[in-house]
Image: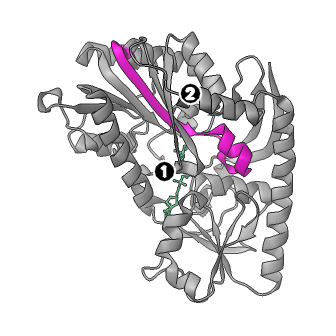
Amino acid sequence: MKKQFLDLGKQPIANNFLHEDQYEEEQFFNISMGYDSDSGLVSLMEYVDKKVLFNENYAYKSSMSTTMRDHFNHVALSLKVQFDPGIVLEIGSNDGVFMTNFSMTPRDGMCCISVEPCSNFAEITRSKGYTTYDKFWDIDTAKEIIQDYGQVDLVYSANCMCHIPELRDAFKAVHEVLRPDGVFVFEDPSLSDMVEKCSYDQIYDEHAHIFSVMALTKLLSDCGFVTFKIDHAKTHGGSNRIYAAKSNAYTVSASVPEALNNEYELKLDKFETYCEFADRVQKSKKDLVDLLSSLKNDGNKIIGYGATSKSTIVFNYCGVGVETLDYISDTTECKQGMMSPGAHIPIIAPPEDGIADDINYAFLGAWNYEEEILKKESVFVERGGKFITHVPDVRTI
Ligand code: JHZ
């Protein structure tokens, strides 16, 4: 049974950047998280309709950072070397940052086809010549692909499986589309990282689940897969890449029991762990509100850096708005000139020569790119400017 441990209150759609004349129609949903002791899954208590979240207006673009571009190039190369796949199917291809590392058709060797329900992004990869099914991932889509291409050698998915409430159906559809010797590789933010780093801003409407290895190995096994390897990646604040096969063709690596043991040590199988996490979340909120208000009282000018889904949660949960932040800078063109969801903070394009001279502090909405951002904003740092983060605890950098 699923039992609630954290309530973040009513939250706007995390990626729904909007104009002032859209405030009246802005939608809010209850965002609270629960632990299911039967399945081990940590999931939202109430799911938001997928068509409300993933549609032609979707704003998040995967290729916006050097970190993620390098990451997906590296993963594509590593999968080619490990599995030598003929046809790869990517589920949730966004702007094609992973799939464009492969060729377009089986005729030209290792190729990649994809499924992407946000039609604005499906159009981007299609216009580059790749086959993209503008659909949600389910058994019908799997059958359509089998009809067009036959079963595929490898299914890859990044930051997408955790978006799917009906996980069992999604895994079964992957099982159907894969050849008997095929491999399913997927990566999503990890629950152990979220609990350890108190990064509660991973919890928002799109993240139907935050995955533990415990819950995934169990569910995958129920759906006919053997989990044979787990890579831990630094991306998105700490993610797990899960490798699962339909057969016993692959030896189970030590990385699987190691990841499971780590989670048992963190007591991710105990409801109390999540209650203790919820207490830390409340403290994090108080600490951030206190820090921001004391900086503001001292006359500092503060901005947000990165209009992330995560920062939507932080600002709305902590009640941070335009009285505190002058604006948020973000490199994604379609977010610029818009207002942030719920808090309605203006979003601007970052100035070409870095953070403006009159700014003293920048809240790192994109804390998961801290290294890349600190390097890029070295002038700001050298002149005494400071970043603010809440992960793993509230502090200035
Ligand atoms: P970023 C997204 O979450 C949404 P978000 C999604 N649901 C998901 O699962 C996770 O990713 C994994 C900007 N930026 O990647 C670009 C700068 O402005 O943390 C982006 O708008 N300057 C699919 O939204 C944002 O920050 C920079 O120098 O939390 C980063 O968003 C850099 C590096 C980024 O994902």
Image spot of residue 305 (x, y percent): 58, 68
Which residue type carries mark 1?
Tyr
Does the segment drawn in magenta span residue 288? no
Numbered range of the magenta stretch: 177-206
Mark 2 nearby-residue class (10 Å; few <14, some 14–19, many ≥20)? some
Say if 102 sits above or below 341 in the image: above
The residue at which mark 2 appears reads as 256
Residue under the point 86% across and 56% down = 283
| 124, above or below 52, in the image | below
For ligand 1, tell me if the residue under mark 2 lies within 8 Å.
no
Q: Residue at x 50, y 16 (%)?
A: 226
Q: Where residue 60 is drawn, which disc sits there? A: 1
Pointer 1 local density, CA inside 10 Å: few below 14, some 14–19, many at least 20: some
Residue 20 location, x and y as percent? 61, 63
Residue 132 visible? The answer is no
**SS type, badge 1:** loop
Number of the label disc, if any, that sits on residue 153: none
